[in-house]
Amino acid sequence: MDDDSHRPGLDQRRIIDAALQFIDEHGVQSLTMRRLGATLGVEAMALYRYVPSREALLDGVVEAVIEDLYGDPEVLLEARDGWQDYLQRLSHGVRRIALTHPAVFPLVATRPPAAPWIRPPLRSLRWVDSFLTVLHDAGFRDDDAVAAYRAYTSFLLGHLLLEVSQRGVPVTSEDEPEGAAADDPAGEVDLSTYTHLGRLKPLLEQDESAAEFEEALESLVERLDLLRRHGARFGR
Amino acid sequence: MDDDSHRPGLDQRRIIDAALQFIDEHGVQSLTMRRLGATLGVEAMALYRYVPSREALLDGVVEAVIEDLYGDPEVLLEARDGWQDYLQRLSHGVRRIALTHPAVFPLVATRPPAAPWIRPPLRSLRWVDSFLTVLHDAGFRDDDAVAAYRAYTSFLLGHLLLEVSQRGVPVTSEDEPEGAAADDPAGEVDLSTYTHLGRLKPLLEQDESAAEFEEALESLVERLDLLRRHGARFGR
DNA sequence: ACCTGAACACCGTTCAAGT
DNA sequence: ACCTGAACACCGTTCAAGT
Protein backbone atom coordinates (compact mmCIF):
# COMPACT_ATOMS: atom_id res chain seq x y z
CA MET A 1 0.00 0.00 0.00
CA ASP A 2 2.35 2.70 1.23
CA ASP A 3 5.29 0.93 -0.36
CA ASP A 4 6.49 4.20 -1.83
CA SER A 5 6.60 6.26 1.33
CA HIS A 6 10.20 4.98 1.36
CA ARG A 7 11.64 6.97 -1.46
CA PRO A 8 13.30 10.04 0.09
CA GLY A 9 16.70 8.36 0.46
CA LEU A 10 18.33 6.85 3.50
CA ASP A 11 19.06 8.61 6.71
CA GLN A 12 19.93 7.44 10.23
CA ARG A 13 16.66 8.77 11.57
CA ARG A 14 14.61 7.01 8.92
CA ILE A 15 16.44 3.74 9.56
CA ILE A 16 15.83 3.91 13.29
CA ASP A 17 12.17 4.75 12.79
CA ALA A 18 11.80 1.86 10.37
CA ALA A 19 13.50 -0.47 12.85
CA LEU A 20 11.16 0.67 15.61
CA GLN A 21 8.13 0.02 13.46
CA PHE A 22 9.51 -3.33 12.39
CA ILE A 23 10.08 -4.40 16.00
CA ASP A 24 6.62 -3.23 17.01
CA GLU A 25 5.19 -5.44 14.28
CA HIS A 26 7.43 -8.49 14.30
CA GLY A 27 9.54 -8.47 17.46
CA VAL A 28 13.24 -7.90 18.05
CA GLN A 29 14.22 -11.42 17.11
CA SER A 30 12.86 -11.00 13.60
CA LEU A 31 14.76 -7.81 12.94
CA THR A 32 17.64 -8.53 10.60
CA MET A 33 19.61 -6.06 8.60
CA ARG A 34 18.50 -7.72 5.39
CA ARG A 35 14.81 -7.60 6.25
CA LEU A 36 15.05 -4.04 7.50
CA GLY A 37 16.80 -3.08 4.29
CA ALA A 38 13.99 -4.65 2.28
CA THR A 39 11.51 -2.57 4.29
CA LEU A 40 13.34 0.53 3.14
CA GLY A 41 13.71 -0.64 -0.43
CA VAL A 42 17.43 -1.13 -0.16
CA GLU A 43 20.00 -3.88 0.34
CA ALA A 44 21.18 -4.58 3.89
CA MET A 45 24.67 -3.34 3.11
CA ALA A 46 23.40 0.16 2.42
CA LEU A 47 22.39 0.54 6.09
CA TYR A 48 25.98 0.37 7.25
CA ARG A 49 26.66 3.81 5.88
CA TYR A 50 24.35 5.25 8.55
CA VAL A 51 24.48 2.73 11.37
CA PRO A 52 27.64 1.04 12.58
CA SER A 53 26.06 -2.28 13.52
CA ARG A 54 22.85 -4.04 14.39
CA GLU A 55 23.63 -3.66 18.08
CA ALA A 56 24.12 0.08 17.70
CA LEU A 57 20.86 0.23 15.78
CA LEU A 58 19.04 -1.40 18.71
CA ASP A 59 20.61 1.16 21.03
CA GLY A 60 19.39 3.85 18.69
CA VAL A 61 15.86 2.48 18.80
CA VAL A 62 15.89 2.46 22.60
CA GLU A 63 17.21 5.99 22.67
CA ALA A 64 14.59 7.18 20.18
CA VAL A 65 11.79 5.67 22.21
CA ILE A 66 12.97 7.37 25.39
CA GLU A 67 13.54 10.58 23.48
CA ASP A 68 9.83 10.55 22.65
CA LEU A 69 9.17 11.47 26.27
CA TYR A 70 10.39 14.97 25.53
CA GLY A 71 7.58 15.42 23.09
CA ASP A 72 4.90 14.24 25.49
CA PRO A 73 2.85 17.27 26.52
CA GLU A 74 1.62 15.43 29.62
CA VAL A 75 5.16 15.10 30.90
CA LEU A 76 6.53 18.52 30.02
CA LEU A 77 6.57 21.45 32.42
CA GLU A 78 8.67 19.80 35.01
CA ALA A 79 7.40 20.63 38.47
CA ARG A 80 4.14 22.22 37.50
CA ASP A 81 2.31 21.13 40.61
CA GLY A 82 5.00 19.89 42.90
CA TRP A 83 7.32 16.94 42.81
CA GLN A 84 4.60 14.36 43.42
CA ASP A 85 2.72 15.56 40.39
CA TYR A 86 5.92 15.49 38.39
CA LEU A 87 6.59 11.88 39.37
CA GLN A 88 3.03 10.95 38.47
CA ARG A 89 3.26 12.53 35.04
CA LEU A 90 6.70 11.12 34.32
CA SER A 91 5.58 7.64 35.38
CA HIS A 92 2.54 7.70 33.19
CA GLY A 93 4.60 9.00 30.29
CA VAL A 94 7.01 6.08 30.59
CA ARG A 95 4.10 3.70 30.97
CA ARG A 96 2.53 5.00 27.78
CA ILE A 97 5.80 4.33 25.99
CA ALA A 98 5.99 0.81 27.38
CA LEU A 99 2.44 0.02 26.28
CA THR A 100 2.93 1.61 22.87
CA HIS A 101 6.11 -0.36 22.21
CA PRO A 102 5.79 -3.54 24.27
CA ALA A 103 8.31 -5.41 22.14
CA VAL A 104 10.90 -2.68 22.65
CA PHE A 105 10.50 -2.23 26.38
CA PRO A 106 12.56 -5.29 27.35
CA LEU A 107 15.39 -3.67 25.40
CA VAL A 108 14.86 -0.43 27.30
CA ALA A 109 15.09 -2.49 30.47
CA THR A 110 18.10 -4.64 29.72
CA ARG A 111 20.47 -2.95 27.24
CA PRO A 112 23.62 -2.04 29.14
CA PRO A 113 23.34 1.67 30.02
CA ALA A 114 25.99 4.20 28.99
CA ALA A 115 27.05 4.50 32.63
CA PRO A 116 25.96 2.25 35.51
CA TRP A 117 24.08 5.07 37.21
CA ILE A 118 22.04 6.05 34.14
CA ARG A 119 19.41 3.55 35.14
CA PRO A 120 16.70 2.09 32.97
CA PRO A 121 14.05 2.92 32.14
CA LEU A 122 15.02 6.62 32.12
CA ARG A 123 18.38 5.96 30.48
CA SER A 124 19.24 9.53 29.61
CA LEU A 125 21.29 12.15 31.35
CA ARG A 126 18.60 14.69 30.64
CA TRP A 127 15.89 12.75 32.44
CA VAL A 128 18.15 11.88 35.34
CA ASP A 129 19.05 15.52 35.74
CA SER A 130 15.43 16.56 35.40
CA PHE A 131 14.41 14.10 38.08
CA LEU A 132 17.13 15.18 40.47
CA THR A 133 16.46 18.86 39.85
CA VAL A 134 12.80 18.56 40.69
CA LEU A 135 13.54 16.67 43.87
CA HIS A 136 16.30 19.06 44.83
CA ASP A 137 13.99 22.03 44.38
CA ALA A 138 11.39 20.25 46.48
CA GLY A 139 13.80 20.15 49.38
CA PHE A 140 15.27 16.66 49.10
CA ARG A 141 18.80 16.40 50.42
CA ASP A 142 21.34 15.19 47.88
CA ASP A 143 21.62 11.67 49.21
CA ASP A 144 17.86 11.39 49.60
CA ALA A 145 17.31 12.58 46.05
CA VAL A 146 19.70 9.92 44.78
CA ALA A 147 18.04 7.26 46.93
CA ALA A 148 14.68 8.39 45.57
CA TYR A 149 15.99 8.15 42.02
CA ARG A 150 17.09 4.58 42.61
CA ALA A 151 13.88 3.54 44.30
CA TYR A 152 11.84 5.20 41.60
CA THR A 153 13.61 3.56 38.66
CA SER A 154 13.37 0.15 40.34
CA PHE A 155 9.65 0.59 40.84
CA LEU A 156 9.04 1.77 37.30
CA LEU A 157 11.14 -0.92 35.68
CA GLY A 158 9.69 -3.79 37.65
CA HIS A 159 6.09 -2.79 37.16
CA LEU A 160 6.27 -1.95 33.49
CA LEU A 161 8.38 -4.92 32.51
CA LEU A 162 5.89 -7.24 34.15
CA GLU A 163 2.91 -5.43 32.73
CA VAL A 164 4.34 -5.63 29.24
CA SER A 165 5.35 -9.26 29.69
CA GLN A 166 1.94 -10.16 31.08
CA ARG A 167 0.25 -8.55 28.10
CA GLY A 168 2.26 -10.98 26.02
CA VAL A 169 4.69 -9.63 23.52
CA PRO A 170 3.68 -11.05 20.15
CA VAL A 171 6.47 -13.56 19.61
CA THR A 172 5.25 -13.86 16.06
CA SER A 173 7.92 -16.20 14.82
CA GLU A 174 7.38 -15.19 11.22
CA ASP A 175 6.27 -18.60 10.09
CA GLU A 176 3.23 -18.57 12.34
CA PRO A 177 0.31 -16.95 10.48
CA GLU A 178 -0.05 -14.19 13.05
CA GLY A 179 -2.46 -15.91 15.38
CA ALA A 180 -1.58 -19.57 15.50
CA ALA A 181 0.09 -19.24 18.91
CA ALA A 182 -2.69 -17.11 20.37
CA ASP A 183 -3.73 -19.56 23.08
CA ASP A 184 -0.53 -20.75 24.68
CA PRO A 185 -0.67 -24.46 25.47
CA ALA A 186 1.43 -23.98 28.62
CA GLY A 187 -1.57 -22.40 30.31
CA GLU A 188 -3.17 -25.83 30.35
CA VAL A 189 -1.06 -27.20 33.21
CA ASP A 190 -2.66 -29.46 35.76
CA LEU A 191 -3.08 -27.39 38.89
CA SER A 192 -4.70 -30.04 41.05
CA THR A 193 -1.43 -30.94 42.75
CA TYR A 194 -1.10 -27.44 44.16
CA THR A 195 -2.69 -26.07 47.26
CA HIS A 196 -4.31 -22.85 46.13
CA LEU A 197 -3.51 -22.37 42.47
CA GLY A 198 -6.65 -24.03 41.23
CA ARG A 199 -8.90 -21.79 43.24
CA LEU A 200 -6.87 -18.65 42.63
CA LYS A 201 -6.35 -19.08 38.89
CA PRO A 202 -9.27 -16.83 37.93
CA LEU A 203 -7.93 -14.09 40.17
CA LEU A 204 -4.40 -14.59 38.88
CA GLU A 205 -5.57 -14.28 35.30
CA GLN A 206 -7.25 -10.93 35.84
CA ASP A 207 -5.36 -7.96 34.51
CA GLU A 208 -5.33 -5.25 37.15
CA SER A 209 -2.15 -3.64 35.86
CA ALA A 210 -3.48 -0.11 35.67
CA ALA A 211 -4.88 -0.05 39.20
CA GLU A 212 -1.82 -1.77 40.62
CA PHE A 213 0.44 0.71 38.90
CA GLU A 214 -1.44 3.61 40.47
CA GLU A 215 -1.39 2.02 43.87
CA ALA A 216 2.29 1.11 43.82
CA LEU A 217 3.15 4.58 42.53
CA GLU A 218 1.09 6.15 45.28
CA SER A 219 2.84 4.00 47.86
CA LEU A 220 6.26 4.88 46.48
CA VAL A 221 5.52 8.58 46.54
CA GLU A 222 4.43 8.31 50.16
CA ARG A 223 7.64 6.51 50.98
CA LEU A 224 9.68 9.18 49.23
CA ASP A 225 7.79 11.86 51.11
CA LEU A 226 8.87 10.24 54.36
CA LEU A 227 12.41 10.33 53.05
CA ARG A 228 12.10 14.02 52.21
CA ARG A 229 10.70 14.93 55.60
CA HIS A 230 12.77 12.75 57.90
CA GLY A 231 15.81 11.70 55.89
CA ALA A 232 16.97 8.15 55.34
CA ARG A 233 15.79 5.91 58.15
CA PHE A 234 18.84 3.72 58.00
CA GLY A 235 21.35 6.46 57.23
CA ARG A 236 24.93 5.99 58.24
CA MET B 1 42.71 -28.52 33.07
CA ASP B 2 39.46 -30.33 33.78
CA ASP B 3 38.95 -30.88 30.04
CA ASP B 4 38.08 -34.49 30.67
CA SER B 5 35.34 -34.04 33.23
CA HIS B 6 33.19 -34.12 30.09
CA ARG B 7 33.42 -37.77 29.23
CA PRO B 8 30.35 -39.45 30.77
CA GLY B 9 28.24 -39.00 27.64
CA LEU B 10 25.60 -36.45 26.88
CA ASP B 11 22.49 -35.82 28.83
CA GLN B 12 19.98 -32.97 28.93
CA ARG B 13 21.01 -32.06 32.44
CA ARG B 14 24.69 -31.94 31.53
CA ILE B 15 23.97 -29.78 28.51
CA ILE B 16 21.94 -27.28 30.53
CA ASP B 17 24.60 -27.12 33.22
CA ALA B 18 27.27 -26.55 30.61
CA ALA B 19 25.17 -23.81 29.00
CA LEU B 20 24.70 -22.11 32.38
CA GLN B 21 28.40 -22.17 33.03
CA PHE B 22 29.12 -20.93 29.52
CA ILE B 23 26.73 -18.00 29.93
CA ASP B 24 28.17 -17.15 33.32
CA GLU B 25 31.58 -16.95 31.70
CA HIS B 26 30.91 -15.48 28.29
CA GLY B 27 27.39 -14.05 28.22
CA VAL B 28 24.24 -15.16 26.45
CA GLN B 29 25.22 -13.60 23.14
CA SER B 30 28.28 -15.77 22.90
CA LEU B 31 26.44 -19.00 23.48
CA THR B 32 26.13 -20.87 20.20
CA MET B 33 25.27 -24.49 19.74
CA ARG B 34 28.60 -25.09 18.08
CA ARG B 35 30.62 -23.50 20.87
CA LEU B 36 28.60 -25.25 23.53
CA GLY B 37 29.16 -28.52 21.73
CA ALA B 38 32.88 -27.90 21.71
CA THR B 39 32.73 -27.32 25.47
CA LEU B 40 31.26 -30.79 25.84
CA GLY B 41 33.66 -32.39 23.40
CA VAL B 42 31.00 -32.97 20.79
CA GLU B 43 29.68 -31.49 17.56
CA ALA B 44 26.77 -29.06 17.78
CA MET B 45 24.45 -31.45 16.01
CA ALA B 46 24.73 -33.97 18.82
CA LEU B 47 22.98 -31.58 21.20
CA TYR B 48 19.74 -31.76 19.24
CA ARG B 49 19.11 -35.27 20.48
CA TYR B 50 18.61 -33.86 23.98
CA VAL B 51 17.45 -30.29 23.41
CA PRO B 52 14.94 -29.27 20.76
CA SER B 53 16.42 -25.85 20.00
CA ARG B 54 18.65 -23.10 21.29
CA GLU B 55 15.61 -21.20 22.54
CA ALA B 56 14.41 -24.21 24.49
CA LEU B 57 17.89 -24.58 25.91
CA LEU B 58 17.79 -21.01 27.21
CA ASP B 59 14.42 -21.74 28.79
CA GLY B 60 15.98 -24.79 30.38
CA VAL B 61 18.81 -22.72 31.80
CA VAL B 62 16.36 -20.24 33.30
CA GLU B 63 14.33 -23.04 34.79
CA ALA B 64 17.41 -24.73 36.22
CA VAL B 65 18.53 -21.53 37.88
CA ILE B 66 15.15 -21.00 39.50
CA GLU B 67 15.03 -24.66 40.46
CA ASP B 68 18.19 -24.04 42.48
CA LEU B 69 16.07 -22.16 44.98
CA TYR B 70 14.63 -25.45 46.17
CA GLY B 71 18.06 -26.50 47.26
CA ASP B 72 18.74 -23.33 49.21
CA PRO B 73 18.64 -24.16 52.92
CA GLU B 74 18.06 -20.51 53.76
CA VAL B 75 14.83 -20.49 51.80
CA LEU B 76 13.38 -23.87 52.78
CA LEU B 77 10.94 -24.38 55.63
CA GLU B 78 8.32 -22.15 54.24
CA ALA B 79 6.73 -20.15 57.01
CA ARG B 80 9.21 -20.89 59.74
CA ASP B 81 8.80 -17.57 61.48
CA GLY B 82 5.79 -16.02 59.86
CA TRP B 83 5.10 -14.70 56.41
CA GLN B 84 7.36 -11.69 56.74
CA ASP B 85 10.29 -13.92 57.53
CA TYR B 86 9.35 -16.13 54.58
CA LEU B 87 9.33 -13.17 52.21
CA GLN B 88 12.68 -12.05 53.54
CA ARG B 89 14.27 -15.45 53.01
CA LEU B 90 12.73 -15.95 49.60
CA SER B 91 13.87 -12.50 48.50
CA HIS B 92 17.40 -13.06 49.60
CA GLY B 93 17.42 -16.44 47.93
CA VAL B 94 16.41 -14.94 44.61
CA ARG B 95 18.92 -12.16 45.09
CA ARG B 96 21.70 -14.67 45.65
CA ILE B 97 20.74 -16.35 42.39
CA ALA B 98 20.76 -13.04 40.55
CA LEU B 99 24.18 -12.15 41.87
CA THR B 100 25.58 -15.61 41.22
CA HIS B 101 24.35 -15.61 37.61
CA PRO B 102 24.19 -11.96 36.60
CA ALA B 103 24.34 -12.78 32.90
CA VAL B 104 21.38 -15.13 33.21
CA PHE B 105 19.13 -12.90 35.26
CA PRO B 106 17.96 -10.74 32.35
CA LEU B 107 16.74 -13.97 30.79
CA VAL B 108 14.92 -14.85 33.99
CA ALA B 109 13.32 -11.43 33.80
CA THR B 110 12.35 -11.30 30.15
CA ARG B 111 11.76 -14.79 28.73
CA PRO B 112 8.04 -15.16 28.06
CA PRO B 113 6.57 -17.11 30.99
CA ALA B 114 4.61 -20.33 30.50
CA ALA B 115 1.44 -18.49 31.49
CA PRO B 116 1.04 -14.72 31.90
CA TRP B 117 0.43 -15.03 35.63
CA ILE B 118 3.55 -17.10 36.34
CA ARG B 119 5.50 -13.92 36.81
CA PRO B 120 9.24 -13.48 36.75
CA PRO B 121 11.40 -13.83 38.66
CA LEU B 122 9.62 -16.72 40.42
CA ARG B 123 8.51 -18.31 37.17
CA SER B 124 7.41 -21.64 38.58
CA LEU B 125 4.05 -22.97 39.66
CA ARG B 126 5.65 -24.40 42.74
CA TRP B 127 6.98 -21.06 43.95
CA VAL B 128 3.79 -19.23 43.13
CA ASP B 129 1.82 -21.79 45.07
CA SER B 130 4.27 -21.67 47.93
CA PHE B 131 3.99 -17.90 48.07
CA LEU B 132 0.19 -17.92 48.00
CA THR B 133 -0.01 -20.69 50.57
CA VAL B 134 2.13 -18.84 53.07
CA LEU B 135 0.09 -15.68 52.66
CA HIS B 136 -3.18 -17.56 52.83
CA ASP B 137 -2.14 -19.25 56.05
CA ALA B 138 -1.13 -15.87 57.42
CA GLY B 139 -4.67 -14.63 56.99
CA PHE B 140 -4.48 -12.81 53.66
CA ARG B 141 -7.74 -12.83 51.74
CA ASP B 142 -7.52 -14.38 48.28
CA ASP B 143 -7.54 -11.14 46.35
CA ASP B 144 -5.07 -9.57 48.75
CA ALA B 145 -2.73 -12.53 48.44
CA VAL B 146 -2.80 -12.20 44.66
CA ALA B 147 -2.24 -8.45 44.88
CA ALA B 148 0.67 -9.13 47.22
CA TYR B 149 2.09 -11.65 44.79
CA ARG B 150 2.00 -9.10 42.01
CA ALA B 151 3.49 -6.31 44.09
CA TYR B 152 6.19 -8.62 45.37
CA THR B 153 7.31 -9.90 41.98
CA SER B 154 7.42 -6.35 40.61
CA PHE B 155 9.57 -5.24 43.49
CA LEU B 156 11.95 -8.18 43.22
CA LEU B 157 12.29 -7.96 39.45
CA GLY B 158 12.91 -4.24 39.33
CA HIS B 159 15.46 -4.20 42.10
CA LEU B 160 17.45 -7.22 41.05
CA LEU B 161 17.48 -6.40 37.36
CA LEU B 162 18.86 -2.97 38.12
CA GLU B 163 21.33 -4.28 40.65
CA VAL B 164 22.65 -6.82 38.18
CA SER B 165 22.73 -4.29 35.37
CA GLN B 166 24.49 -1.75 37.56
CA ARG B 167 27.10 -4.33 38.47
CA GLY B 168 27.79 -4.55 34.77
CA VAL B 169 27.26 -7.85 33.07
CA PRO B 170 30.55 -8.74 31.40
CA VAL B 171 29.62 -8.15 27.77
CA THR B 172 32.86 -9.89 26.91
CA SER B 173 32.44 -9.91 23.18
CA GLU B 174 34.89 -12.76 22.78
CA ASP B 175 37.43 -10.71 20.83
CA GLU B 176 38.06 -8.41 23.75
CA PRO B 177 40.78 -9.91 25.95
CA GLU B 178 38.54 -10.07 29.01
CA GLY B 179 39.30 -6.66 30.41
CA ALA B 180 39.73 -4.25 27.55
CA ALA B 181 36.26 -2.76 28.05
CA ALA B 182 36.66 -2.45 31.80
CA ASP B 183 36.43 1.33 31.92
CA ASP B 184 33.51 2.26 29.71
CA PRO B 185 34.18 5.40 27.70
CA ALA B 186 30.52 6.50 27.97
CA GLY B 187 31.13 7.38 31.60
CA GLU B 188 33.24 10.27 30.40
CA VAL B 189 30.33 12.45 29.32
CA ASP B 190 30.48 16.18 29.90
CA LEU B 191 28.14 16.88 32.78
CA SER B 192 28.69 20.63 32.98
CA THR B 193 25.56 21.38 30.99
CA TYR B 194 23.37 19.73 33.60
CA THR B 195 22.08 21.27 36.76
CA HIS B 196 22.98 18.77 39.44
CA LEU B 197 24.60 15.80 37.76
CA GLY B 198 28.12 17.10 38.19
CA ARG B 199 27.76 17.52 41.93
CA LEU B 200 25.79 14.31 42.41
CA LYS B 201 27.95 12.03 40.28
CA PRO B 202 29.98 10.69 43.24
CA LEU B 203 26.75 9.84 45.04
CA LEU B 204 25.26 8.31 41.92
CA GLU B 205 28.28 6.11 41.44
CA GLN B 206 28.13 4.62 44.91
CA ASP B 207 26.76 1.12 45.08
CA GLU B 208 24.23 0.92 47.89
CA SER B 209 22.36 -1.99 46.35
CA ALA B 210 22.35 -4.19 49.40
CA ALA B 211 21.07 -1.53 51.78
CA GLU B 212 18.49 -0.31 49.27
CA PHE B 213 17.28 -3.82 48.72
CA GLU B 214 16.72 -4.27 52.46
CA GLU B 215 14.96 -0.97 52.77
CA ALA B 216 12.68 -1.47 49.80
CA LEU B 217 11.88 -4.98 50.97
CA GLU B 218 11.08 -3.68 54.42
CA SER B 219 8.83 -1.04 52.96
CA LEU B 220 7.05 -3.55 50.75
CA VAL B 221 6.43 -5.90 53.66
CA GLU B 222 4.95 -3.04 55.64
CA ARG B 223 2.67 -2.20 52.75
CA LEU B 224 1.59 -5.81 52.46
CA ASP B 225 0.91 -5.91 56.17
CA LEU B 226 -1.47 -3.00 55.75
CA LEU B 227 -3.15 -4.95 52.99
CA ARG B 228 -3.49 -7.99 55.24
CA ARG B 229 -4.97 -6.01 58.11
CA HIS B 230 -7.24 -3.60 56.27
CA GLY B 231 -7.77 -5.08 52.79
CA ALA B 232 -7.15 -3.30 49.52
CA ARG B 233 -7.47 0.43 49.95
CA PHE B 234 -8.85 0.97 46.49
CA GLY B 235 -10.88 -2.23 46.32
CA ARG B 236 -13.96 -2.33 44.17
C1' DA C 1 21.86 -45.89 20.27
C1' DC C 2 24.52 -42.17 19.63
C1' DC C 3 27.32 -39.08 17.07
C1' DT C 4 29.14 -36.89 12.62
C1' DG C 5 29.54 -34.76 7.76
C1' DA C 6 27.59 -32.45 4.67
C1' DA C 7 24.23 -29.45 3.45
C1' DC C 8 20.52 -25.68 3.62
C1' DA C 9 18.93 -21.37 4.49
C1' DC C 10 19.98 -17.96 6.71
C1' DC C 11 22.94 -14.26 9.56
C1' DG C 12 26.20 -9.67 10.31
C1' DT C 13 29.69 -7.37 8.15
C1' DT C 14 33.46 -5.88 4.73
C1' DC C 15 34.87 -4.02 0.56
C1' DA C 16 35.84 -3.54 -4.18
C1' DA C 17 33.05 -2.30 -7.81
C1' DG C 18 29.44 0.03 -10.06
C1' DT C 19 26.38 4.37 -11.04
C1' DA D 1 28.06 10.26 -2.86
C1' DC D 2 25.44 6.46 -2.42
C1' DC D 3 24.22 1.83 -3.26
C1' DT D 4 25.18 -3.14 -4.80
C1' DG D 5 27.38 -7.91 -5.64
C1' DA D 6 30.07 -10.95 -4.13
C1' DA D 7 32.31 -12.84 -0.52
C1' DC D 8 33.70 -14.26 4.38
C1' DA D 9 32.96 -16.23 8.56
C1' DC D 10 29.79 -17.47 10.99
C1' DC D 11 24.77 -19.12 12.64
C1' DG D 12 20.59 -22.83 13.83
C1' DT D 13 18.87 -26.89 12.19
C1' DT D 14 17.98 -31.27 9.33
C1' DC D 15 19.12 -35.71 7.96
C1' DA D 16 21.35 -39.41 5.73
C1' DA D 17 25.29 -41.80 6.86
C1' DG D 18 28.56 -43.81 9.80
C1' DT D 19 30.04 -46.54 14.17
Image (cartoon, coloured by chain):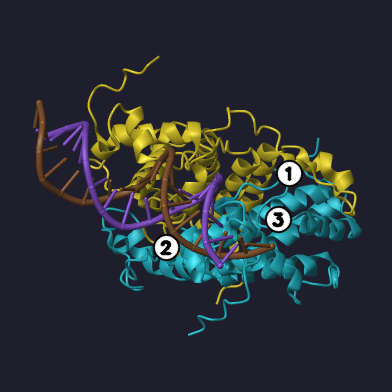
Chain colours: A cyan, B yellow, C purple, D brown
- Same-subunit check for callouts 1 and 3: no
Label 1 is found on which chain of the structure?
B
Which residue is at the far top?
Answer: B1
Left or right for A47, reference B56: right
- Same-subunit check for callouts 2 and 3: no
- Name the one closer to the observer, B62 or B217: B62
Left or right for A229, reference C16: right
Marks 2 and 3 close (CB-CB < 8 Å): no
Relative image position of residue B141 (x, y in whole percent): 48, 63
Indicate the amino acid at tag 3. Tyr
Instruction: Rate crowding at label 2 as few (under 14), some (14 to 19) or many (20 or more) other CA atoms within 10 Å.
Output: many
| Residue B121 appears in the picture as rendered | no
Residue picked out by circle 2: B116
Please give the name of the residue rendered at 85% of the width and 45% of the height, measured from the top-left corner: B200
Please give the name of the residue rendered at 27% of the width and 53% of the height, measured from the top-left corner: A193
Left or right for A75, reference A15: right
Label 3 is found on which chain of the structure?
A
- Name the one closer to the observer, D15 or A169: D15
- Name the one closer to the observer, A194 or B114: B114
